[in-house]
Amino acid sequence: MPKKVAKRFIEFKRGETLYGILNRHGFTSHHSSLILKQNPLPKGLSLSNGEAYRLRVSGDKKFAEIKIYDAPKDLSYVFWRNGSAAGSLIKNEPFGIKERVVRGEVRGSPLNAIYQKIPSQWIAHRFMDAYTFDYNLPKRLQRGAKFKIRLETKWDGEDLIGYGEILETAIELGSAVERRFYIRYPGGGTFVDPGNSYADRPLFAPVSYLRVSSLFEARRFHPIKQRKQPHLGVDFELPEGTDIFAAESGRVLRSGFQRASGNFVVIQHKNGMESYYNHMLNIAPGIYPGARVDNGQKLGEIGCTGYCTKGHLHFAVKKRGRFVDPLRYIKNYPYRSQKLISLNSEDL
Ligand SMILES: [Zn+2]
């Protein structure tokens, strides 16, 4: 490697592709083909508007290295060229973690308010995930509501390269303050509400890490999203291969493969409820029509079969024959052994 290598961070532009970035920094089609031959591009790699990648270039420009971070997963993707040689690698590197507390006020949408303070779509969406079970939160939110977020920042040496989990959130709703705490456990993690276990809800979450990528939308035409079809379930975005669990005990009504749903399972529960699991990678042995399942039993794994662009579970709930918003009916599995380490009642 040449002696003098300059380092800087560059923000992704909207709609940018990896090839565009490589091209801009002097990677030729010869370099790109070497990279592609060696290592197919990672499926989950996302170039997020507002986030940055690291560029290192030698003084004579013969060497260049682009490093794209997936901070939440402690991964980085490195693409390099040196003369006519080129290559890429995926690095698993536990980044340095520091905690930070951010405070602000909601003006406009909560997502925007958070984004103003922390320019990360990941964090803004994780904040909404923290309130997954509070379907009426946006309605209760008033202009000027104060919020606080305690979160992990991730560091590559001395460089801030992204964010990890939100550890604690608080937001003013009228005269109340709604707090959520993140607890980790093997294979997952979840936001809990210290004041409410949602014990009266009839179903459990079908995955152990709740990350919502698409909400239930019953209207036939959504004027903002211009979506012509209703979305009669909720999408949980998770890596392929992650376990999917039965939301309650019951009996398998249907299972198999359909062109749109991919691998799917439908379970019939008590009280006229049914739960649907679509786009599964596979269906676990013992899950077939007529089979009895226990709550929390593994049904299969997250996949992207059927009409699907990225690994996720489309989870739907029917109550007395009609699809309802699943987020109003599910609760976390009870992780009673986990104590809330950071439970404090400090003000906003
Ligand atoms: Zn869906």
Image (cartoon, rainbow, N blue to C red):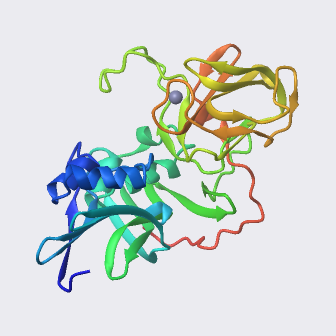
- Residue 63 shown left or right of residue 278 in the figure: left
Q: Residue furthest front?
A: 84
Residue sitting at x 55%, y 58%: 180
Give above or below for 241 relative to 31: above
Residue sitting at x 56%, y 27%: 233
Q: Residue furthest left?
A: 60
Q: Position of residue 171 (x, y in %)?
A: 44, 56
- Residue 274 shown left or right of residue 62 in the figure: right
Give above or below for 192 relative to 294: below
The foreground one among 73 and 340 is: 73
- Residue 139 shown left or right of residue 9 in the figure: right
Can residue 240 be seen in the rendering of this structure? yes
Give above or below for 131 relative to 277: below
Which quadrant is home to the N terminus? bottom left
Residue sitting at x 81%, y 24%: 252
Image quadrant assignment for residue 141: top left
Q: Position of residue 83 (x, y in %)?
A: 21, 68
Image quadrant assignment for residue 188: bottom right
Can residue 106 be seen in the rendering of this structure? no
Residue sitting at x 65%, y 51%: 196
Q: Position of residue 282 (x, y in %)?
A: 69, 34
Q: Position of residue 348 (x, y in %)?
A: 42, 67
The foreground one among 307 and 97 is: 307
The foreground one among 122 and 62 is: 62
Give above or below for 317 relative to 243: above
